[in-house]
Amino acid sequence: MPAAAARALERSRTRSRPITENRLYAFLNLAFGVGEAQFRAMALREAGPQKKVSGSAPADPDFMFVLGALDVAISEGTSFGQSIVRKASRGGPTKGYDLSGNELARVRQELLSSVVAAFGRGPATSSLYANFVAALQPTDKLITTNWDTLLDFAIQSLNRDVDYGARPMTYVDAAEKPDNAEAPVLPLHKLHGSLNWLFCPRCSLVYANRRQNTAPIRGKRPYYVRCHVCAPKKDSSLQAELEAVLVSPTLLKTYRIAQLKQVWINAQSALALADEWVFVGYSLPIDDMWVVAMLLRAAATQRSFKQCPKITVVDRSGEPVRSRYARLLGWPVLDGGSDFAEYVQRMSRDLYNYPREWNES
């Protein structure tokens, strides 16, 4: 939320407009009672803990609540009412935003664009992830519910290309030029989208950059990544604004983009045919019923083949999480330890191999 507030203030300064005209501020003001002073204080916190805000201020709205409220309102077609009015140009009548429909969708895009920008300031690579990727076998496939791109970039750093398992998807570089895979490909199914994906709402094409995060809006002005299919190169007025492909981590999840549905199909197929399932840091949260249903369908396929995959859980919660998996799937679950770094070390040393002779007994 501090990143979103800071971004909104920067855009308002660039356009020489008061912050009260910003859609994100208008929404937080109406829905969560965030005033201008609190909004500016929230933006200051984006600069880091060294920035002290004098006085006692109310807590920032929770990101999950904000995103969840937006998703519910957009899905149900409801409104949060009229925003604070502003003076129209040339002496016209005052007007404001009716925070419903497309206006709420724009608030959501601005919020998610801030998330992309905030993650972009973090480390681009991780030695732990690189070691993990190096220890993978050629037939391994990866499935994640995370948005972040540490795993994507780790794969690239080891001269392997990512295959997200979605079609049609165009891979582009920083200059928006096609980036065709030339190195060995490793499947990475990102169930909830990714910080480096953009979607064209006109032709339904998804663009992916395997080397950097991307956002619909960058810098001090709106930034449009041109759709190579449906937008003329020289007429920016006809270009559709590309959208972030990020499924909300809330109880209300929507998978309206066809490529995401294909990712789920490919992920389920990978699970249905795999000899071993390894879960890292995933505790089967109650709001992920879609993932639970996918696991159960894949398990049903395995049972129809009279197979039982080896199931390993690496999680800090230990036995409670393993028991949850065992109750759900009805199969034995192995303890992969509580620390991912230690698990990767065991992979690298080839000391973490379990017997292949399993049966359903």
Image (cartoon, rainbow, N blue to C red):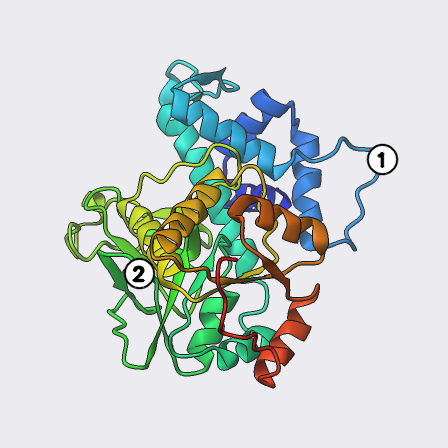
Label 1 sits on a secondary structure element that is loop
Dots 1 and 2: beta carbons under 8 Å?
no
How far across and down, in percent of the image, does residue 154 sit? 49, 74
Residue 246 in view here: no
In the rendered view, tell whether residue 98 sits above or below residue 172: above
Residue topped by disc 1: 55
Work out how far the residue at label 1 is from the one at label 2, CA to CA, in angstroms: 51 Å
Residue 256 lies in quadrant: top left
Q: Residue at x 60, y 77 (%)?
A: 352
Residue 165: which numbered mark, if any? 2
Percent x, y for residue 189? Answer: 39, 59
- Which numbered marker is on residue 147? none
Quarter occupied by the N terminus: top right
Does 228 sit above or below residue 105? below
Q: Between 97 and 143, which is closer to the camera in this rendering?
A: 143
Q: Amino acid at mark 1?
A: Gly
The residue at 62%/82% (across/down) is 351
Mark earlier in primary sequence (1, 2): 1
Q: Is residue 25 above or below residue 153?
A: above
Count numbered badges in the picture: 2
Residue closest to the far bottom: 349
Find numbered disc 2 in the image and state the secondary structure of the residue it sits on: loop
Amino acid at pointer 2: Gly
